Amino acid sequence: MAQTLTYKILQKHLVEGELKAGEPIGIRIDQTLTQDATGTTAFLLFESMGTARVQTDLSVSYVDHNMSQFGPENHNDHLYLKTIAAKSGVYHSRPGNGICHQVHLERFGKPGATLLGSDSHTPTGGGIGMLAIGAGGMDVAVAMGGGPFFMTCPKVIGVELTGKLDDWVASKDVILKLLSILTTKGNVGCVVEYFGKGVETLTVPQRATITNMGAELGVTTSIFPSDAMTEKFLIAQGRDDDYQPLLADLDAPYDRVIEINLSELEPMAACPSSPDNIAPISEIAGRKLNQVVIGSCTNSSYADMMMVAETLKERKVDPMVELGIALGSKQVLQMLAENGALATMIAAGARIIESGCGPCIGQGFSPADGTVTLRTFNRNFPGRTGTKGDQAYLVSPETAVASAIMGEITDPRDMKNMMGLGYPRIKMPREFLIDDSMIDAPVPADQAGRAEVLRGPTIVVPESPKPLPKSLNGKVLLKCGDKITTDHIMPAGAFLKYRSNVPQYSKYVFNCFNKEGKPTFADRGLALKKQGIAGIVVGGDSYGQGSSREHAALCPMYLGVRVVIAKAIERIHKANLINFCIVPIEFGNPADYDKINHDDALEIPDLLDAVKDKDSVTILDKTAGFGFAGKLSLSQRDRDILLAGGLLTYTRKKAGK
Ligand code: MIC
Ligand code: SF4
């Protein structure tokens, strides 16, 4: 029977279940990646599991998110990550070597392999034909220990690309177009697979921009075929041996097909403050701006950066605009340093930021109040820049650089008329500069026993969840609306340095809803916990979208949250809730959401029994005086994890430890 590329790879890696959309399956994981902000807990949990060395073909630990090093916390994390990686058989990419997804694509990604990463943009690897999936750190820790990854067997959405991108139109515009069609809601349990003639015209980094930002659709992953373009990229990275051709069968059974004609696309933007709030640049051109930032794992490849440099040649950034550029990897930074393009950027007035996530995760470059910032990133959730009420637009590097020169949002296609500038089409290099000296190999297994692990005092082993009660008495700690992201739940930016210290980091749970002079969410949660009353969060649609950070479950768990009731809960966050023994419940009838209020006392008399084997559970709102049904969409494994008291205890029990 004809198969999609997704199913071909799944079939090769299937260890449990049946390949039928909607069914739970377990797959073998070949490679894992972790990054510093999720990595410390992932490694602490990995250590608690008691497996000494990783069991994957390859595991890499990156330091790219938090490199600010204000206070000792950050560097404590870096040293812990470096030494635990060496001991556990994991490669370690040092701070300054680049953003995990870009470096992984350049140096390790392999067509046909499975990659599990503790970062939601792990699907970047789909640009090279891998099945690359984002998950919580605990799931990645299990995969590092050789355990399968459990997921829902996906539906596959086929995106047929035809035509060819025009000058100044970028692959970013392809994914913005798709976001305008599919939005960030309602795509849970799907994989997006690209096919068609247009695919051949896109380079691997262009494809990776598309699969990277595919994360914003809420899908499990996105994938491109592995073809001549992939081979060229791998040869240029000195990795010819990793190539294998991979295509879907001609009549592959897609659940839905969307056609995008590349020739018809125009430059677009995701307007404030959601990645699916799409408008063509032609409609918003002329808006004044004061900041442009180019970089992130979405758009900082060699070709993106060379195009930016060529456009800036003999030009200056508008004096009312600050232009920040973070080149995605040391490879790109070093190549541009050597060929003079970096000097061009500096001469034009750009501020060069080190290779890492930087402003994308709110580490610096927070825009001024009431100003417009243009970014080549993938997320513009409210406040993610570090400024409350921010106005962040997500655009291609082409639009970003044109706008930085003009001082207002500019359609880059107008550069020809405005300054006689033709599109600087960048050729992919035949050979990239290969220098892996900032990637440390692990110590050999026979010496691992003696390898020392450095644990600074700010690294605190997270508390384990308590078993679920038979019946639950709780209180609504917070009722929030639709599209609550994990950035709302557990802010990053300035608080990122507390990631390895759950009691400290927990103080900022739902910080955006805290009011000055009033007890915080954390204060209220801990007070209830002391009285033995469970915390409950009530949410709307797409609850928990965005980042994979398991702290958005781990920290609420620490504060006594035991149940989340929402209209819909996003995939990674739902798994994280289960892993930390918080029961995810969906409204049987979404209208019941309107009847519940903040502070209501809720009772779930048969919680434990329902988690055992029921698809629904009765919830009593004792304050409002009504009862309603909640849906439990759980696999048998989800139930077993909840009943065991979370994934760590479940895994330990299974291994007989
Ligand atoms: C993000 O882009 O939101 C992050 C920061 O990379 C997160 C991971 C994290 O919160 O550490 C993600 O995408 O999963
Ligand atoms: Fe880093 Fe931003 Fe990419 Fe997340 S989206 S991995 S913060 S660059």
Image: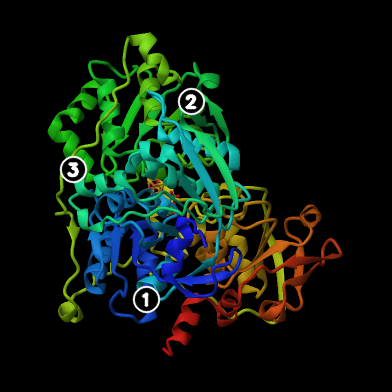
Residue at x-position 32% and y-position 31% = 324
State left or right for residue 363 relative to residue 474: left
Tag 1 secondary structure? loop
Marks 1/3 in contact by CB < 8 Å: the verdict is no
Q: Which mark is residue 432?
A: 3
Q: Distance between the residues labelled 3 and 2?
A: 30 Å
Identify which amino acid the numbered label 2 is placed on. Answer: Glu
Residue 245 place in picture, x, y as percent:
33, 54
Residue identifier under label 2: 266
Q: How far apart are marks 1 and 3 (CA)?
A: 33 Å
Q: Can residue 514 be seen in this view?
A: no
| Residue 411 figure quarter | top left
Q: Nearer the viewer, mark 1 or mark 3?
A: 3
Residue at x-position 34% and y-position 58% = 36
Mark 3 or 2, nearer chain start: 2
Identify which amino acid the numbered label 1 is placed on. Answer: Gly
Q: How crowded is mark 1: few (under 14 residues within 10 Å), some or many (20 or more)?
A: some
Q: Residue 146 carries which label?
A: 1
